[in-house]
Image (spheres, rainbow, N blue to C red):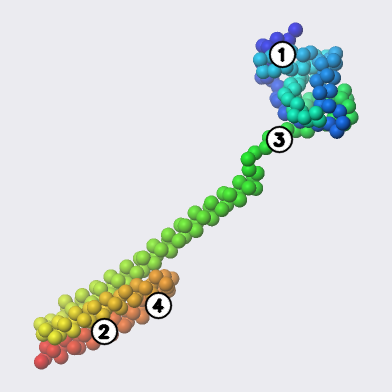
Amino acid sequence: PIINDDLLALDCVQTCTPLVVKSVVSSVLCLQCEVSSHPGFYAISGSNGRHFIFVSDHQLRLCRIKILEQISKKEGRLQMFTRTDHQAVIFVQFLHSILPEDVTFIPYLPTVPHSIQQAGSILKQELQHKIANITAQLQQAEVNRITDTAIHVEVGNVGDCIEGSSISPTFHSKKAAVQKARGSGSMTAEVGKQAKTKSENGSSIERERKKFLTTKRKMRERFEVNEDI
């Protein structure tokens, strides 16, 4: 007789193939009845359920099936254990020969929460969202860099214009210089605003730089007149 240790040994050399048995008219319980009454099968109850082992002198010798559950009258699940895929095909053909014609066997494919297509769509959306966030951050960083550069250039030029003058300006000339510096501050803010809206176009900064050079030249000419006075 076959014992549980023999089942453990068979597990080492056989591969499990899960199947679904379905019928149109007959009850799937006929499978267990036909296998139990067939002289070529030997039934054994192991620690993991009841097995029906084919013991006849045949190429299917020691192949076995394990009936798991009956889902409905016309549908059930079982496991088939064979050493090769070729044996699995022959075993299914043999079972068809002893069962009613309306009984069929199909591979059991467990359902998953999401299909591969749905999972791919979710992953694609997450990647697109991350790419959009990174792109927006890079664009904002570029705008900030251009704005900071414009501010530093304009303020530095104003400082060079005032500090580089060799005259000692009068009260009125100092007041005029302060007003010019304040006006330059307003102009710098305007430049910064334009730079944010035109981060990819450096022509605006070039125009403002030329405008400031003109203002600087006029300021120096004015200081030189005051010094002569």
Classify the position of the C terminus by image quarter. bottom left
CB of mark 2 within 8 Å of CB of mark 1? no
Distance, label 1 to label 4, CA atoms, is 87 Å
The reply to whether residue 105 is in sight is no
Looking at marks 2 and 4 on the same chain, the residue that comes earlier in the sequence is marked by 4
Distance, label 4 to label 3, CA atoms, is 64 Å
Distance, label 3 to label 2, CA atoms, is 80 Å
User: Residue shown at 85%/15% (left/top)?
Assistant: 37
Asked whether, in this view, residue 221 is left or right of residue 17, the answer is left
Residue 35 sits above or below residue 73 on the image:
above
* Element class at badge 2: helix
Identify residue for label 3.
109
Looking at marks 2 and 1 on the same chain, the residue that comes earlier in the sequence is marked by 1
Q: Which mark is residue 215?
A: 2
User: Residue shown at 43%/61% (left/top)?
Assistant: 138
Asked whether, in this view, residue 215 is left or right of residue 129, the answer is left
Query: Percent from the top left, x then y, of residue 128?
Result: 54, 55
Distance, label 1 to label 3, CA atoms, is 26 Å
Distance, label 2 to label 1, CA atoms, is 102 Å
Looking at marks 4 and 3 on the same chain, the residue that comes earlier in the sequence is marked by 3
Looking at marks 1 and 4 on the same chain, the residue that comes earlier in the sequence is marked by 1
Specify the amino acid type for callout 2.
Thr
Asked whether, in this view, residue 100 is left or right of residue 6, the answer is right
Specify the amino acid type for callout 3.
Leu
User: Residue shown at 50%/58% (left/top)?
Assistant: 132
Q: Residue 180 appears in which quarter of the rendering? A: bottom left
Identify residue for label 4.
203
Which of labels 3 and 2 is toward the front? Answer: 3
